[in-house]
């Protein structure tokens, strides 16, 4: 086996709320793939979708600069996050700081009040990029001792995970913007069947769905319609906000459109946990899904 590699982990706010099952399953599967994650101490919110509304560009950049300054304390150049919004903010602001001496100085002036400074040039990775570029599908397949035979999965990447960094050198070039394949590859490495699912990168409405769900239900209905048409047992998505929205609003969609959707929405790391033979609760955290993935739970050891 190869030498274990360590990443500095930024969990993000969703890891302590609606994305707890993403965080738990991610923490469970990484050691199984010989990867260690070490949390950033005393991390803060990245600003996510409300950062620019509340404070503007600079405060959000400083928030991310603080996390990066705390990350460099781990003496490890590779930072990883599993949340799409956290990745967009942490990675994007990191690249801006690295490319502008003036911005770095401004950020460090603000960080100085807390006794911090960001002097290194860290590299921020999305968890999916690490699974594709660092770990690889062969290792995931080899570790899948409990293959998910008979499970049909619609791979819904969402709009953020591959935009705007996936097809760039800074983003690891791990997939394309319009027709990404990594989610289907992970599904198949786990022994499940990836269904023909067209709206891979469709938007669910994001944070707009939280504030004004009536403006976004039609977007989610399109995704659910395609999942049903594909014959999927579950939808798999790497984005915690996508996962929450698509589960939480199925009742509202059913009420508005007269449909009867009841489709579980899981994370690829939950599929991996079950395929790896880990516990359904402690490893896959399937008990934390709003819509229970009954077929997947039955496959768990």
Image (cartoon, grey):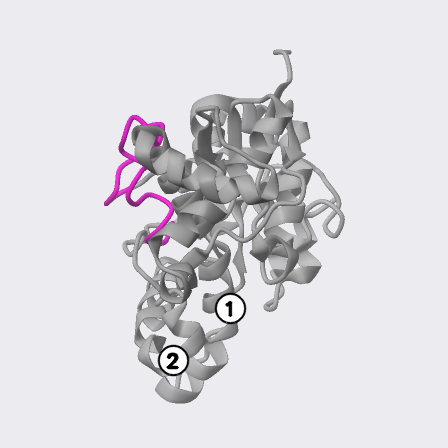
Q: Give residue 127's mark.
A: none
Measuring 47% from the left and 51% from the top, which residue is drawn there?
Answer: 152
Locate residue 233 relative to residue 289 in the image: left or right.
left
Asked if residue 82 is positioned above or below residue 21 in the image, the reply reads above
Which SS does the magenta portion mostly show? loop
Measuring 54% from the left and 39% from the top, which residue is drawn there?
Answer: 112
Which image quadrant for residue 42? top right
Q: Give residue 212's mark.
A: 2
Which image quadrant for residue 207? bottom left
How many angstroms separate mark 1 from mark 2 (CA)? 16 Å
Q: Is residue 142 magenta?
A: no
- Magenta segment: 157-179
Q: Give residue 247's mark.
A: 1
Q: Nearer the viewer, residue 281 or 17?
A: 17
Q: Position of residue 167 (x, y in %)?
A: 27, 33
Identify the secondary structure beneath mark 2: loop
Q: Nearer the viewer, mark 1 or mark 2?
A: 2
Q: Position of residue 105 (x, y in %)?
A: 39, 34
Crowding at dot 1, Cα within 10 Å, few <14 / some 14-19 / many 20+, comes out as many
Camera sees residue 89: yes
Asked if residue 71 is positioned above or below residue 265 in the image, the reply reads above
**Quadrant for the C terminus in the image:** top right
Q: Position of residue 110 (x, y in %)?
A: 48, 44
Locate residue 285 relative to residue 72 in the image: left or right.
right
Task: Give yes or no for contact between labels 1 and 2 (Cβ–Cβ under 8 Å).
Answer: no
Measuring 37% from the left and 72% from the top, which residue is drawn there?
Answer: 208
Q: Position of residue 217 (x, y in %)?
A: 36, 77
Asked if residue 197 is positioned above or below residue 188 in the image, the reply reads below
Camera sees residue 192: no
Tell which circle, 1 or 2, labels the residue nearer the N-terminal end: 2
Q: Is residue 173 magenta?
A: yes
């Amino acid at each position: 086996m190869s030498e274990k590699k360590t990443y500095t982990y930024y969990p993000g706010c969703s890891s302590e709320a609606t994305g707890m099952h993403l965080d738990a399953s991610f923490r469970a599967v990484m050691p199984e793939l010989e990867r260690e994650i070490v949390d950033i101490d005393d991390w803060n919110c990245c600003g996510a979708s409300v950062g620019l509304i509340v404070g503007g560009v600079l405060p959000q950049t400083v928030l991310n600069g603080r996390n990066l300054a705390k990350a460099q304390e781990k003496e490890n150049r590779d930072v990883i996050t599993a949340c799409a919004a956290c990745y967009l903010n942490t990675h994007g602001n990191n690249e801006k700081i690295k490319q502008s001496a003036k911005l770095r100085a401004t950020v460090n002036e603000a960080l100085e009040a807390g006794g911090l400074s960001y002097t290194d040039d860290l590299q921020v990775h999305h968890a999916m990029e690490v699974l594709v570029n660092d770990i690889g599908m062969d290792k995931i397949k080899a570790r899948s001792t409990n293959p998910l035979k008979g499970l049909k999965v619609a791979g819904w990447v969402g709009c953020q995970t591959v935009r705007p960094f996936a097809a760039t050198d800074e983003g690891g070039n791990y997939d394309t913007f319009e027709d990404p394949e990594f989610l289907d590859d992970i599904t198949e490495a786990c022994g499940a069947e990836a269904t023909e699912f067209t709206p891979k990168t469709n938007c669910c409405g994001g944070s707009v769905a939280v504030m004004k769900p009536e403006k976004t239900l039609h977007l989610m209905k399109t995704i659910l319609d395609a999942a049903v048409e594909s014959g999927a047992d579950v939808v798999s998505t790497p984005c915690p906000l996508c996962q929450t929205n698509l589960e939480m609003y199925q009742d509202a969609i059913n009420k508005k459109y007269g449909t009867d959707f009841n489709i579980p929405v899981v994370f690829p790391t939950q599929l991996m946990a079950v395929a790896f033979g880990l516990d359904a609760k402690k490893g896959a955290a399937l008990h934390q899904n709003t819509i229970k993935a009954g077929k997947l739970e039955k496959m768990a050891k």
